[in-house]
Amino acid sequence: MITHKKLSNGFEYIEVKNSAAEAKIALQGAHLFHYARVDEEPILWLSEVSDFEPGKAIRGGVPICWPWFGFHENKSLPQHGFARVSMWELVYSDESDEKRTTLTFRLTNSNQTLKIWLYKFELELHVTISDKLTMELKTTNIDDKEFEITQALHSYFKVSHISNVSVKGLDKKPYLDALTYKNEVQEGDISFNQEVDRVYQEVDGKIVLKDKKREIIINNDGSSSVVVWNPWIEKTSRMSAMKKDAYEHMLCIESANAFDDARVVKPQKSHTLKATIF
Ligand code: BG6
């Protein structure tokens, strides 16, 4: 079942329930902020104190960072681009299979976007809610000049406790440590006892988030970069919409096209970044 819902402040989202799973996706940002298989714990983390307000990104779920990832060199422009705080349209839905619901959200250029990013585009998010969660972010260049994008499906995963988890699949991969700006190479699995903010490159296989009682698998297509981020104690205290112990229960593993993995999209061509999570 697909239901359009509205909070008392007017914030709109789509609720999906089928025989395999349920999800919630805000029209602002096409921001999926809940996904759980039937009778299972949510896969994604959502801040208990997140704002659901126009113009502010929800803290948790899967914000869409687009058309740039991270800071823009023009510091007056928003970190992680404008897609996550723009209003998208739900343009297609299919629930003919009781175990699977598919939805397409669309964002196109407007006078406002053209002021901060000079290109005409069509951006679509195809979401499939089933016993797996798939998100395909398709960028189409409808301009007459090429453009370059960096982007991420910035997934926040819910974990039992950050000290219980490890991330597999990135052994021997080079990464940029965003805390020191040094290039490093991963040795073994990643575990967490301090702030981590890294952009892995040359990633070509599945990533496994291993927790005490479950494993989450992340498969990416159209991407060779993955961001692994936990803000730890001090950064959490400076961040919006985070309780002070929030870092203990979340870990971001972001399916990305970032830094060396930026993509050029030629006129009338598309690029799709896809994440499958289960
Ligand atoms: C991550 C970055 O992708 O996003 C972090 O690697 C950043 O450096 C984080 O702090 C959250 O960003 P924001 O803009 O949602 O607070």
Image (spheres, rainbow, N blue to C red):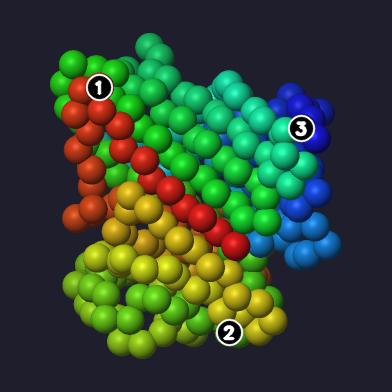
Frontmost of labels 3 and 2 is: 3
User: Can see residue 83?
Assistant: yes
Q: Quadrant of the N terminus?
A: top right
Q: Position of residue 60 (x, y in %)?
A: 60, 53
The residue at which mark 1 appears reads as 268
- What residue type is disc 1 on? Gln
Relative placement, left or right, of 148 versus 212 is left
Looking at this view, is 49 or 19 the one in front? Answer: 19
Local SS, label 3: strand
Circles 1, 3 touching at the beta carbon (< 8 Å): no
Q: Hey, which residue is sitting farthest front in the picture?
A: 97
Disc 3 to disc 2, how far (Cα)?
Answer: 37 Å
- What residue type is disc 2 on? Ser
Q: Quadrant of the C terminus?
A: bottom right
Local SS, label 2: helix
Q: Quadrant of residue 127?
A: top right
Disc 2 to disc 1, how far (Cα)?
Answer: 47 Å
Looking at this view, is 254 or 234 the one in front? Answer: 254
Disc 1 to disc 3, how far (Cα)?
Answer: 32 Å
**Label 3, ligand 1: CB separation under 8 Å:** no
Give the total of numbered labels: 3
The residue at which mark 3 appears reads as 2
Relative placement, left or right, of 210 versus 123 is right
The residue at which mark 2 appears reads as 163
Circles 3, 2 touching at the beta carbon (< 8 Å): no
- What residue type is disc 3 on? Ile
Q: Residue at x 19, y 55 (%)?
A: 260
Frontmost of labels 2 and 1 is: 1
